[in-house]
Amino acid sequence: MIGCGWIAPFHVEALRQLGRVGEIVWVADPNLSQAQALATGTNARAIPGYKTALAEIDCAFVLVPHHLHHSVTLDCLNAGCHVLLEKPIANTLAEADNMIFAAEHAQKTFMVAYPHRYKHSFLLLKEIVETGRYGKLIMLDSLIDDSVEGYLAPWMTQKATLGGGCLFSAAGHQLDIMLWLCGRVRTAYMVGMRSRVPMEGEDSAACIMKFENGSIGIVRHTWASPHVRIWYTMDVMCEKAHITLTCTPLGDQNTEGVRCRWQTRIVARTASEEVLLENDEGLDLAPEIAHFFGCVDTGRTPDTDGCVAREITAVMLAAYARAAVDGANV
């Protein structure tokens, strides 16, 4: 594991759930005390730098700030490692293309972490849409209601290191599901503003998209919520029903982290209301990591490979470019 920030304990917990499928050899972070804290309770050793230790491992989990994704991933691929990279793929399309080429040249698995589509709840949602159980899909509307208070790292405050604002950094989770359900985006437009979060980019944004299949997608994302109630909501409007997936923290996800408990529900509303799913899925990365290791073992292309991740970034960058022309962001 390269990078021992907020998301890293979720990867450790997922590997614990998966058992002996993968062993953590080392965790690396320039802040050695942070690496040591992450290694506690595992058999891994903590190191300040990763480059000289790449020869010891099969797979690298790259969990570093966005502006480092390109260089660290290339180091790992060139050393012969398979790579699971936290989203987004990179801050530019040129960097993304370099990474995709490097993975192909090295013949190594390269997967970008968009974990929601691997969860049981979202797999069920896709099945509901694709079977036409409630008729044709008309519109998707997703909101992530979040607050970064208490865990906004310094690199997240700068456009050069984050890659943009909250839309670029985190709304890819929503867009990935929409692309998975609807296919390619024909056009996208975003608006954004900065309200209460001390950062250069927007802390709240909305993006509306027209998909090539004719449906509409709306992504809303905020890091400035005064009170997070339902963290993730995906509304799916079909001809015969309004389907809603919600993922709700039952505690404070920022301070509790991997210990936070969750409730996930899917409800279909027609003339009546039907609960299609209720479970405790939250920020569980085990299904995603199991998929990654399966691809490493079989040579299969990951469902969220570099090309899929590049498309997500391309849609967002195009939306940002249009907003810059019209003065629609910040």
Image (cartoon, helix red, strand yellow):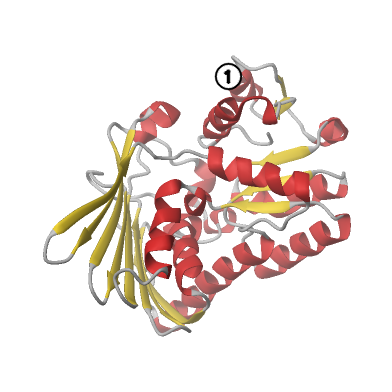
Could one spot residue 199 in this view of the protein?
Answer: no
User: Which residue occupies 53% across, 58% down?
Assistant: 159
User: Which residue occupies 44% across, 67% down?
Assistant: 178
Amino acid carrying mark 1 in the image: Ala
Q: Where residue 212 sits in the image (x, y, percent)? A: 48, 84
Give the quadrant of residue 80.
top right
User: Which residue occupies 82% across, 49% down?
Assistant: 77
**Which residue has dot 1 on it?**
37
Query: Is 265 above or below relative to 29?
Result: below
Position of the N terminus, as image quadrant, is: top right
Q: Is residue 46 left or right of residue 221?
A: right
User: Which residue occupies 26% across, 44% down?
Assistant: 228
Could one spot residue 103 in this view of the protein?
Answer: yes
Q: Nearer the viewer, residue 147 or 187?
A: 187
Query: Is 10 above or below relative to 226?
Result: above
Element class at badge 1: helix
Q: Is residue 303 left or right of residue 324?
A: right
Query: Is 44 above or below relative to 144?
Result: above
Q: Is residue 207 left or right of residue 70?
A: left
How crowded pointer 1 is (Cα within 10 Å; few <14, some 14-19, many 20+) is rated as few
Q: Where residue 236 sits in the image (x, y, percent)? A: 31, 66
Q: Where residue 196 sits in the image (x, y, percent)? A: 30, 51
